[in-house]
Image (spheres, helix red, strand yellow):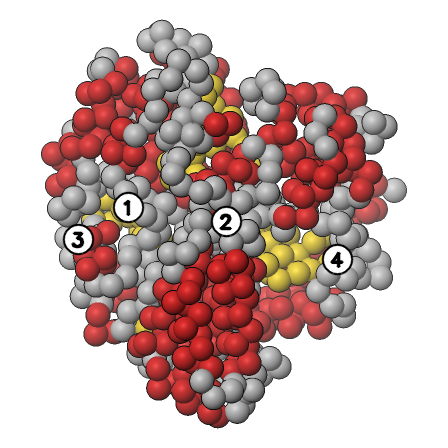
Amino acid sequence: MSLISPQLKAKFDAVVARYPKGQEQSAVIPLLHAMQEQGGGRLTEADQKAVAEFLAVPVSKVHEVATFYTMYSLEPRGRQHISICRTLPCALCGCEGVTEAVRERLKVAPGEVTADGEFSYEEVECLAQCHLGPVLQVGDTVYGNLTPEKASALIDELARKGGAAAAKKD
Amino acid sequence: MEPSPKYLTRNFGNPAALGFDGYSAAGGYAGLKKALAMTPQEIIDLVKAGNLRGRGGAGFPAAVKWGFLGKTDGPKYLCVNADEGEPGTVKDGPLMENDPHQLIEGIAIACFALGIRQSYIYIRGEFYKAIRIVEKAVEEAYAKGVLGKNVLGSGFSLDVAVHPGAGAYICGEETGLLSSLEGKKGMPKLKPPFPAVKGLYGAPTIVNNVETLACVPHILTLGADAWNALGTEKNGGTKIYNVCGHVQRPGYHELRHSVTLRELVYDVCGGPLPGRTVKGVVPGGSSSPILLPSEMDVRMDFDSLGKAGTMLGSAAVIVMDDRTSMVRALDNLLHFYSHESCGQCTPCREGTHWLYLISQRIVNGEGRPGDVDRMLDICGNMVGNTICVLADAAALPTQSYIKKFRAEFDAYAAAGRRIALVGGAQEKAVAHA
């Protein structure tokens, strides 16, 4: 249980309290989100086991959830993970060019992490921001009306922000 | 086109309304106060008279759905479907981000009318901003006595909690949503029993869309007649439409149901890009059958679009201009549906998968004789043969794209080479494909 710090445990208790007694399994999704955030964007087997033990549900049930939903990643991600929408409204407005610009700028394939650990990216299905297409999402921020040039410039900006954040930590 | 007053979006652009005081100052919570002085049955009858249709996509009368709620002395639930994700759809996100108390007020009225004391708002996980804003508004609503014990001194108690999703289109299907809320894979459940009888944790449950509930306070304050006057026959109120794709001014708008698809695309959103013409229009989200330019004089209500062989669905209009390859457009959607099929029903799991594989064959210039008919044959084995309608949502557009653009599909299959999704100006952007 060492993966669950006292602060995290307090947060978990508050989440579990939202659901009726005996329905603790309902908390699996929010708890996995919290574990993934703590783990820098990746869910490990130990994370899943910790959630299963905390909620007293079989680890297989937690693993089912961790592998069914697209927001969970069992593989490492960059400190900044970029989700690029690929679905029709964005595609009509040129999202393929945006993905290509991101690929050229980061020089890795979707799902891979850049050598400095800063970035990873993937194509995702509809982000429900269709009037702003093409869009991509980084963390909780959505960027819209992109072109290949704007996407490339955005990554420069994100890289500067990432560098600044790292300097602050040191 | 008759101009539309703003109700659902009246607080958009007014950040003060994000807070309880600002929302109340703008007339908020008047509907709840009115409701608390009525009997539950009076509220249900009023919403029924207001012809409120389910705005998640099905258009089922909301008050009729409420009427199915099973009688029990045990717990009952209202689950709010905020898992917006039907391609093209942008309405529930803005409703939560711009006016969270409007949703909370709708929830409180519905729960009071139905004797429900616990509600969960299931918000798609990617909507970080909406989750943050709604959670904050819920917290404030508790502090102000709108939620919790003894709502506004009425003796009625209600708890509301936000539950995040984690990325799965299928959780927008109401029984898939309930599975997900129970902490499981988002797999839909066989109906009957309907959730109103056996839903969350096996208890009677109503699942309503965000926009549906956001309408409820306005029906209370305006009354059924005034609300109906905003809409068309059996389609009460105003509606939020989103328009995207190849138009000059994409965006969402609150309008009367009487607006036609042509007015929406040309008058409200500026029409196609300069020098372009409309080739096809999806009227109600990617799952709705496509319409031709000649079919755009249809009114944007549930019944008119139903008669036109398509549906209002989530009122998400996707415009495709004359540069668009309909074969590639359908292919994009088939990737979506095969990716989003939960996999429990064979006709859907295999059907969406094979539709995409065959489509890819054609798209990559490797189509085989009979492939287009083979796709239609697969569709015939999908529709109506599965637990939920995701299979239909893939098959119906497939049938309509092929039926309405058959010559283009046959020509592409015979061409033996890859064609851009959007030709002309964007040919360069997709040349690597």
Query: Label 4 marks which chain's residue?
Result: A
Whether residue A146 is visible here, answered yes or no, is: no
Residue A62: image location, x then y, percent:
70, 38
Residue holding disc 2:
B170
Amino acid type assigned to the residue bearing label 1 in the image: Gly
Task: For label 2, count other residues whose C-alpha is less than 10 Å away and answer few (under 14), some (14-19) or many (20+).
Answer: many
Between disc 1 and disc 3, the foreground one is 1
- Position of A120 compared to B420: left or right? right
| Disc number for residue B394 | none
- Position of A160 compared to B95: left or right? right
Residue B105: image location, x then y, percent:
35, 26
The secondary element bearing badge 4 is classed as strand
Amino acid type assigned to the residue bearing label 4 in the image: Phe
Identify the image quadrant of residue A63: top right
The secondary element bearing badge 2 is classed as helix
Task: For label 1, count other residues whose C-alpha is less than 10 Å away and answer few (under 14), some (14-19) or many (20+).
Answer: some
Label 2 vs label 4: CA separation?
Answer: 29 Å
